[in-house]
Image (cartoon, rainbow, N blue to C red):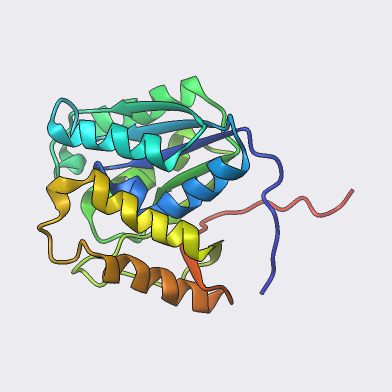
Amino acid sequence: MIRLGAGPLDRIVAVGAHCDDIAIGAGGTLLAMCLARPGLRVDALVLSGGGTDREQEERAALAAFCPGADLRITVHKLPDGRLPAYWEEAKAAVEELRGQTDPELILAPRTEDAHQDHRGLAQLIPTAFRDHLVLGYEIVKWDGDLGRPSAYQPLTPEIAEEKVRLLQEHYPSQRHRPWYDREAFLGLARIRGIECQARYAEAFAVTKLTLHLGG
C-alpha cells in the first residue's frame, strides 16, 4: 500500500448529477479536508434539482459537510435521468464552473458508473478540467456496478459516523429508499477501510495521475 499526500490544497471542486451524490460519494472526504483546512474553497456543482425542495436539502447538507469552508454552490435544473438528452446544457455548466476556479482536486462521479447521469457528468469533467486530479467517487446502487478502486481516503470512526448522521439529517426526501440507510453507508465504508488497512474509508477511481516525485 503506497501512501502519498496530495500536497497543499486551497481549492477543490465537487460535482454531482443529483442532489446527494456528492455527500454519498465523498461526504467523509469533504468533512476530513474541511476540518483539516479551514477556509478551503469548495466549488460545488449539481446538475439537477434546482428550484425544488431537493436544492434546499443540498445547500444545507453541503454546508454541514464543508464546515469552515469558502463554499460556493450552484444547482441547475436539468431533468433527472435525462443528462444525455441535455448534453449541451450539462457541458456549458461544467465549462462555466471551469471559468470560475482552478482547483487542485476534483471530486466527481466515476466514468464506470452505471447511471447515465453520473457517467455522463464523469465524461464531461476532463473536457473542461484537462490538467487536474480527478477522484471518481462511488455510489452503491441496485445496478451492482462497484468495481476495484485505485485510491482511498481513510476515515476515522468519528468522521464515518458523522457522514451517516448528516446524510440522514439533511436528505429526508431519500429516507424511504430501501438502500438509503446506515448499514449501506457504513458497510461500504468498512469494506473500503479493510482494503486500505483502515477502519473506514471512501474509495475512488483515478483515470489519470501525473506524479512529481523528484526535486
Q: Nearer the viewer, residue 169 or 130?
A: 169
Q: Nearer the viewer, residue 201 or 215?
A: 201
State the image quarter where residue 2 is shown.
Answer: bottom right
Q: Residue 153: image x %, image y %?
A: 55, 60
The number of callouts visible is: 0
Q: Residue furthest left?
A: 176
On-image quarter of the N terminus: bottom right
Q: Is residue 176 left or right of residue 187?
A: left
Q: Nearer the viewer, residue 117 or 38?
A: 38
Q: Is residue 153 left or right of residue 211?
A: left
Q: Residue furthest right?
A: 215
Residue shown at the point (46%, 72%) measured from the top left: 192
Residue shown at the point (28%, 69%) measured from the top left: 184
Q: Residue 204: in sight, yes or no?
A: no
Q: Is residue 150 above or below residue 14?
A: below
Q: Is residue 161 above or below residue 119?
A: below
Residue shown at the point (51%, 79%) measured from the top left: 194
Q: Residue 109: image x %, image y %?
A: 37, 51
Residue shown at the point (40%, 33%) measured from the top left: 44
Q: Residue 41: image x %, image y %?
A: 54, 29
State the image quarter where residue 64 is shown.
Answer: top left
Q: Is residue 198 left or right of residue 136?
A: right
Q: Residue 192: in sight, yes or no?
A: yes
Q: Residue 16: image x %, image y %?
A: 32, 42
